[in-house]
Every structure is written in structure tokens, then in C-alpha cells.
Image (cartoon, helix red, strand yellow):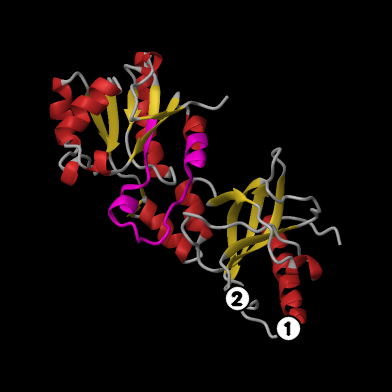
Amino acid sequence: MTIPRLSASHPMPESLRGGVIALGNFDGFHRGHQAVAGEALDWARAEGRPAIIATFDPHPVRYFTPDAAPFRLTTLDQRQELFEAAGADAMLVFEFGTELASTSAEDFIAQLLGQRLGAAGVVTGEDFTFGRGRGGNIEVLRERGAIHGISARAVGAVSEEGEVVSSSRIREALKAGDCGTATHLLTRPFAIRGVVQHGDKVGRTIGFPTANLAMGNYLRPRYGIYAVTATLPGGRVVHGAANMGIRPTFDPPKELLEPHFFDFSGDLYGQEIEVEFHHFLRPEAKFDSLEALTAQMEADCLQARHLLGTASRD
């Protein structure tokens, strides 16, 4: 069962009023986010209240800096599934636009959290800010919330290896090709979900058919070759090697994620798949011939099989 996805622009359903809301962007839903959500879930369960995890979409950065390079770690669909797996009763989406950006901290608490959403409790990270000009923080939320019957708690930052766990730290790891750090901080591999597109089909002519995915709003990891796994429609998991980048051997350059799956021959066009990044193998390279490219791809696949523990059937 999929939990409901609610809009903060509409009144909270009666059955979910009086709930505890975990409030944040939660892009990536990493260890730090999970700590905030966990506090809200525990609080809600202890008092027999609904547990709701909120997020903002589009991300406030996208609103204030529309030309920013793509940086998303998760889509709304992925976050909804992660929130459900964490134990939430519902997902709440704050649509971040001109109206929300111009809402004062006082009105955010009184009119949104109180009147419209009927929150009994709110949990945020210690550094969370809200309201016009970032006029609200946890102190404001506690003080003004109490007037409107809303209790507030803050969860401190989570640190790993002496550094705070943050979405920014995960993005930097991915841009460096450091899948291990990203996986550890996220508690799962970074994953790109998309619909398989038709490409130029060069891969199938040299024995390496690929499932081409556009990157959309996702952060671009370091360009190069990766050992990956993918979840296909129906839940089957396959292993493979993927090119993330612009394919410099081919003209014109075109940015794509192009996974080749081992021991798989099905038709995936038009279907949604999710590709997980496990190991960075090497940077992208331009080859002088298809023969040289094919030889390198064979080596990449052998290395990926080894790293993923996939025995070759050749």
C-alpha cells in the first residue's frame, strides 16, 4: 500500500489532523534526515498520532536560483517510497513558489501548520529555517507554535567520520565519483529513476545494448563508467555497467545515462527503471575506433561483474 501524497495547499484530511510532522527538504532522505523523521515517528507512535513526513517541491534553491545546475538526489516518487518505508502515514508536499516564499514565519505557523494542517507537533533539524526572509527557526517555532497549540522539537546534526551528514556532502561525493561515501551517508546507493528512451542503437550493433535514460533534474555524478544494478518493472534486479556522460566517441555529444545489463535481452523501451550507482570504474574516454571502444567495454563489464559479484555466463 502506498501512503497518500498530500498537498500543503489544501486542508489536512480529518483523519490525519492532530499529527506530528517531520519538516524539511529531505532531498536524499539521508542519515540526518532519517534522524529527524525518526524522532517524529517515535513521538507520533508514543501519543497515538498520525506520523507525517513533509518535503518541499520544487526545492527552494530552484525557486530562488532558477538557473542552478541540476542537484536533486531524489524525485518526489522516490521520497514518497522512502517515507513510507520509514513508517510514515502520509507524505506532505509544500509547493514552493511565490506564495510560500512570501509567507511570514508567523503565518506559516498559525495559518499553515495550525489552521490548515492541524499539526499537534513538528520536528525539524536544528538549522531549519522557514518563512519570508528565513524569519523562522526552531526558537520561533517553539515560541509561536505554543500559542497555537503546536509543540516543536529539534534534532541535532548527525556526524559521520567527524563531518556532518548533509545533502551537500553527498552531492560532492557523487561529483567526485565516490559511490562508497554517498552510499554510506544515504544508507543506500544513489539511484536514478527514469523511462527508457530510444537511442541511436549503436550499442546493440557491437554487442552492448543499452537502456538510455535522460538525467532530468538529478544531480550529475562524475562522468564515467560505473558498476550498477537496476530494478526493472516487476521488481527483477539486474547487474550491469553504465556510461554516465556525453559519450565523447560519438558525435554530436549527448548527455545520457546508458546502462548495459548483463545476461538480459528484454525490451525495456517506454518502461520505468531505477539504476543504482555502486562503483566508479573510470572516467569517460574518446576512442579512435569502435574496436577499441568494444575492447574497453568488455574490460569494463568484466570489472563490474567482479565488483558486483556477478558470475559471467560466457
Assess disc 1: are there few (<14), some (14-19) or many (≥20) residues with their C-alpha within 10 Å of its C-alpha.
few
Residue under numbered circle 2: 252
The picture quadrant where one finds residue 205 is bottom right
In the image shown, does 262 or 204 lie closer to the viewer? 204
| Residue 85 to residue 268: above or below | above
Magenta-span inclusion, residue 14:
no
Residue 81, position as x, y percentages in the image: 52, 35
Residue 161, position as x, y percentages in the image: 38, 54
In the image shown, does 179 or 264 lie closer to the viewer? 264
Three-letter code for the amino acid on which mark 2 is drawn: Pro
Residue under numbered circle 1: 289
In the image shown, does 60 or 169 lie closer to the viewer? 60
Residue 80, position as x, y percentages in the image: 48, 35
Q: Which residues are magenta?
A: 53-81
Residue located at (69% from left, 58% from top): 198
Q: CA gap, disc 2 to disc 1?
A: 16 Å
Residue farthest toward the front in the current orientation of the protein? 98
Quadrant of the snapshot with the N terminus: top right
Residue 160, visible in the rendered structure: no
Magenta-span inclusion, residue 54:
yes
